[in-house]
Image (tube, helix red, strand yellow):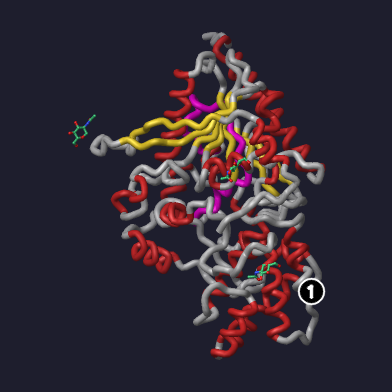
Amino acid sequence: MRWRMVSSGISSFLLLLVPLTKATNSWTIDHFGFFKNGTFKQRYLVADQHWHKSGGPILFYTGNEGDITWFCNNTGFMWDVAEQLGAMLVFAEHRYYGESLPFGAESFRDAERLNFLSSEQALADYAALVGALKKSRPGAEGSPVIAVGGSYGGMLAAWFRMKYPHVVVGALAASAPIWQFPGMVPCGVFYQIVTEVFSKGGAHCSANVRRSWIAVDRLASTDEGLRWLAAEFGLCSPLSRGDGLKSWLQETWGNLAMVNYPYGADFLQPLPAWPVQEACKHLGFGAGVTDQQLLSGVAEAAKLYYNYTGQAECLDISQTATGQLGTRGWFYQACTEMVMPMCTDGVQDMFEPEEWDFQAFSDECFHEFGVRPRPDWAETAYGGRDIKSHSNIVFSNGGMDPWTGGGVTSSLSDSLVAIVIPEGAHHLDLRYNSEYDPQNVLIARAREVKYFRKWIEEASTSPFILISD
Ligand SMILES: *[C@@H]1O[C@H](CO)[C@@H](O)[C@H](O)[C@H]1NC(C)=O
Ligand SMILES: *[C@@H]1O[C@H](CO)[C@@H](O)[C@H](O)[C@H]1NC(C)=O
Ligand SMILES: *[C@@H]1O[C@H](CO)[C@@H](O)[C@H](O)[C@H]1NC(C)=O
C-alpha cells in the first residue's frame, strides 16, 4: 500500500531543501556471539548543517520497525530544534528493516536467518554507530548524544539510555509502550482507549461500531450477504467468511485512533484533520438502523482511512498500514521477545470479546517461524515497571493514543519524567510544528527541549566535577 503527502507539505519541502547524507556502516551480524562472524550494512542518515562542529550535540533517532527515511520524514520535531541546539541529526535504521537487511532478500526466509533480529542487537548496532561517528567526524568526539524515538523507536530510545548510559546522555521516548508486556498493564487498555477516542469522535459512534460485528455475522451467513459485503467495501477479492473482515476493521479502527492528528497528515495513510471525527460522521445511526445501512456507514468510514486520496481501486483486507512498515519483521519480534498481550471484552470496549490466548499465539508463531515467544524476557532484559534506578529519560504520551495505556504516564523521579499531551495522538510531539497544533503539544515540545539542554549542560560539566574524599 502506498501513501502520499497530502498535508500542507511543510515536511516534504524542508527535506528537499536540506542536505541529508545517506551512509552505511558495516556491523557484525551477531554482537553477542563469536561463531557467526559475518557483517551487514546498516543504513543511516545524517543532517549536520546546523551542527556546532566543536562538540555540538547529536540527536540520534533510534530507528524502529520500518524504512528509516519514512521515520525521518515523520520526525519533524528533530528538524525543528536542530538549529537552536546546534545539533547534528542522525537517523539510524533498525536491522532487518528498510535497506538494512543482514541477509538481503533472504533475511526473512527462516529462523536461522531471523535469529539476529532483536532489540538487543539493534541497540548494540546503535551504540557501535555512535562510536564510529564520534571517531570519524572531527569535533564529534565530545558531542553529547541524545536518543530520540517514537513508538517501538521510543522504547528503544529509553532502553538505549538504560543499557548504554555512557553512550547517550538522555532519551526522549515518545509514545513508548515499555509496559505493554505480560503482567505489567491489563491486556484490554489498548482497545479501551480506541473506544474512548471513538466515543468522543461523534454521537453513537462507538455504539455503532459495537453493533456492527453481529451485523457482519448475519450478512456473512449467506453467499448473497458475503457478495454484498465485498461489493459494499470495494474489496479486492471475494469474501468467504466474516472473520477476516472483522479483524481487519478492528485493526483499522486502532490505527485510525493512533493517527487522530489535529491536521491533515500522512503517517499510516493520507488522512484529513481529526480523522476519527470524520469517520464517525458515517456512524451516527440511532436505533432502528438496518444491518445494511449500518455496514454501508462502516464501509464509508473504512474508505475514509484507505481511500482518502481517491486512489484506491479496491480495499485489501490483508493490509492495514503503510508499506513502509516491515510487518513481517515486527511479527517475528512479537513472536520472540516483544510479546504484547491484547484483549477485548465488548463491555469496556466496542469490540467482540476476545481473551489473550498465549498458547494460541505461541502456536501461530511456531507455525509461522518455527520459534516460540519468551513472554518474560522483555521484563528480565529491560526491567519492567522497576526502572527507578535509571535517569535522564522523558516519556511523552498522547493522552488519546491507544499506546498510552502501556506507557509511563507519571514521573518516576526528577529525571524520569512523564509528559502527557491530553488530546495528543501517537507521538504527535515528534511531528513538525504546525499552526494547528494544540497549545499543549507546543508546551510539551518546549519542555522536551529544556531537558535536552539540561542533559547537554550536565554532560559538558561533569568531567570537571571534583570528587572529594
Ligand atoms: C521522504 O521525503 C523525501 C522528500 O520529500 C521523499 O523524497 C522520500 O520519498 C520520503 N521517503 C519516504 C519513505 O516516504
Ligand atoms: C569467519 O569464520 C570462518 C569460519 O567460521 C573463518 O574461516 C574465518 O577466518 C572467520 N573470519 C574472521 C574474520 O574471523
Ligand atoms: C476510491 O475513491 C475513488 C474516487 O472517489 C472512487 O472512484 C473509488 O471507487 C474508490 N475506491 C473504493 C474501493 O471505494
- Element at badge 1? loop
Q: In this view, does 193 lie above or below 377?
A: below
| Residue 376, percent from left and from top | 43, 52
Where residue 296 appears, x then y in whole percent? 70, 78
Taking 454 as reference, is 213 above or below it?
below
Q: 337 or 37: which is nearer to us?
A: 37
Picture coordinates of residue 305 (x, y %)? 66, 63
Residue plotted at (42% across, 36% down): 42
Magenta region: which residues? 158-182
Q: Which corner quadrant holds the N terminus? A: bottom right
| Numbered circles on residues, count | 1
Residue at 75%, 46% (x, y): give it.
Answer: 8
Residue 166 belongs to the span the image colors magenta:
yes
Counting from the top left corner in percent of width and height, residue 221 is at 55, 89
Tell me the crowding category of disc 1: few under 14, some 14 to 19, or many 20 or more residues within 10 angstroms, Cα based.
Answer: some
**Residue under pointer 1:** 284
Which of the two residues, 138 or 460, is positioned nearer the viewer here? 138
Asked whether residue 122 is in view, the answer is yes
Q: In this view, does 307 lie to the left or right of 21?
A: right
User: Does residue 75 appear to the left or right of 362 in the view shown?
Assistant: right
Q: Tag 1: residue type?
A: Gly
